[in-house]
């Protein structure tokens, strides 16, 4: 890691928000530099509580988070919010829609809201979302709330990252319940029927509860709550349930730290492998750009074996 990034990291760990913001920008724009920064935080991971908030567009995820932030200051001295936004078709940056919808929040130094562009990534998270989580966790932010990009289906990637996943739905969502419930019932720890002052709220809640009761782990009660985020209704109960779930996940702190470290190493290794494959595969494409309609199996197999050998060579540790 170069001295400039090392200095930024040192300042971010001490609480300097400007330095942390610059590190977040690096994580979005420079994969190699971000990997070095994240790896240096390896031994500091596993302290933060991570709450994921997912759900389809228009469910009111941002409004729910904005109301939750009124409670976070009671339990935590600092809270980070990562909001995954659609990408601008021109700049590829975040359109900042989620950030705008959270403007009602008191922007004190205890709250850091960062919008991140999805840049075409599926699963509801931006490529750099996990990097941002690592930065906030490693720099001492005790609570991280991640809002996924809702693009029609429930986004499942967050469930593998968060300690607690909150799924926000609306009345009437049950009309499409059969088509969506397989992924839905596997991803959430808490379910919220927001905008519950609208018709169909009770029906949606009943359908959810019935489906969740059929799961193999149905002996563990999964809360299905009703909220009206714009009126702060039901938010107290939601926050209480989130904290209870977080306490349950804290029962084995060492396992949590091991999991965060393993996830980081796995992700950084995948980045290196992908880079090596992409570099080497260009040569393979060049070999097959002639006008032959049929390429013998033996020739194709030999080229593939050379590609594997080239990738392995690139992945060998460099002598220092």
Image (cartoon, grey):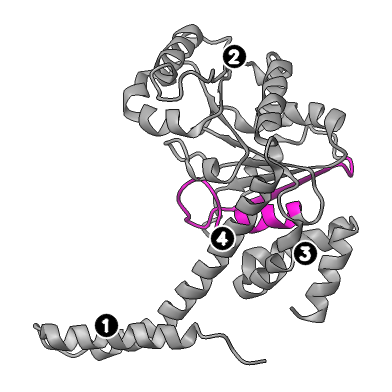
Label 1 neighbourhood size at 10 Å, few (<14), some (14-19), many (20+)?
some
Q: CA distance from mark 4 to mark 2?
A: 36 Å
Q: Nearer the viewer, residue 11 or 196?
A: 11
* Residue 154, image x, y percentages: 45, 35
Q: Is residue 41 left or right of residue 7?
A: left
Location of mark 3 (residue): 22
Location of mark 1 (residue): 304
Where, by quadrant of the figure, is residue 236 drawn? top right
Q: Is residue 93 visible?
A: no
Q: What label does residue 171 carry, if any? A: none
Location of mark 2 (residue): 226
Q: Nearer the viewer, residue 125 or 37?
A: 37
Q: Is residue 186 above or below residue 47?
A: above
Q: Is residue 252 left or right of residue 76?
A: left
Q: Mark 4 against mark 2, which lies toward the viewer?
A: 2
Tag 4's secondary structure? loop
Location of mark 4 (residue): 92
Q: Does residue 125 show up magenta in the picture?
A: yes
Q: Is residue 53 left or right of residue 205?
A: right
Q: Mark 1 against mark 2, which lies toward the viewer?
A: 1
Q: Is residue 51 visible?
A: yes
* Magenta highlight range: 108-137
Q: Earlier in the sequence, mark 1 or mark 2?
A: 2
Q: Earlier in the sequence, mark 4 or mark 1?
A: 4
Q: CA distance from mark 3 to mark 1?
A: 41 Å
Q: State if disc 1 and disc 3 touch (CB < 8 Å).
A: no
Tag 3's secondary structure? helix
The quadrant of the image that shows the C terminus is bottom right
């Amino acid at each position: 890691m170069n001295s400039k990034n090392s200095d930024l990291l040192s300042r971010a760990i001490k609480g300097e928000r400007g330095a942390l913001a610059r590190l977040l920008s690096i994580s979005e724009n420079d994969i190699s530099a971000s990997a070095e920064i994240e790896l240096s935080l390896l031994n500091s991971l596993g302290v933060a509580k991570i709450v994921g908030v997912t759900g389809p567009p228009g469910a009111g995820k941002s409004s729910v988070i904005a109301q939750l932030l009124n409670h976070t200051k009671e339990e935590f001295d600092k809270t980070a919010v990562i909001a995954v936004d659609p990408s601008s078709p021109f700049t590829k940056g975040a359109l900042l829609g989620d950030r705008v919808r959270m403007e009602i929040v008191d922007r004190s130094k205890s709250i850091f809201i960062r919008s991140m562009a999805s840049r075409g990534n599926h699963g509801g998270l931006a490529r750099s979302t996990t990097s941002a989580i690592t930065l906030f966790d490693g720099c001492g932010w005790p609570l991280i709330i991640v809002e996924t990009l809702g693009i029609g289906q429930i986004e499942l990637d967050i469930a593998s990252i968060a300690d607690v996943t909150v799924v926000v739905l609306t009345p009437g969502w049950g009309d499409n319940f059969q088509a969506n419930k397989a992924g839905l019932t596997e991803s959430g720890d808490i379910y919220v029927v927001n905008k519950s002052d609208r018709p169909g709220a009770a029906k949606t809640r009943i359908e959810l509860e019935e489906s969740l009761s059929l799961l193999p782990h149905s002996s563990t009660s999964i809360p299905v709550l009703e909220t009206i985020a714009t009126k702060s209704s039901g938010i107290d109960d939601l926050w209480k349930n989130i904290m209870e779930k977080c306490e349950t996940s804290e029962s084995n702190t060492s396992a949590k730290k091991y999991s965060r470290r393993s996830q980081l190493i796995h992700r950084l290794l995948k980045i290196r492998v992908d880079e090596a494959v992409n570099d080497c595969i260009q040569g393979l494409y060049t070999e097959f750009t002639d006008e032959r309609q049929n390429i013998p199996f033996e020739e194709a197999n030999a080229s593939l074996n050379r590609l594997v050998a080239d990738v392995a060579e690139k992945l060998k540790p460099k002598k220092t």
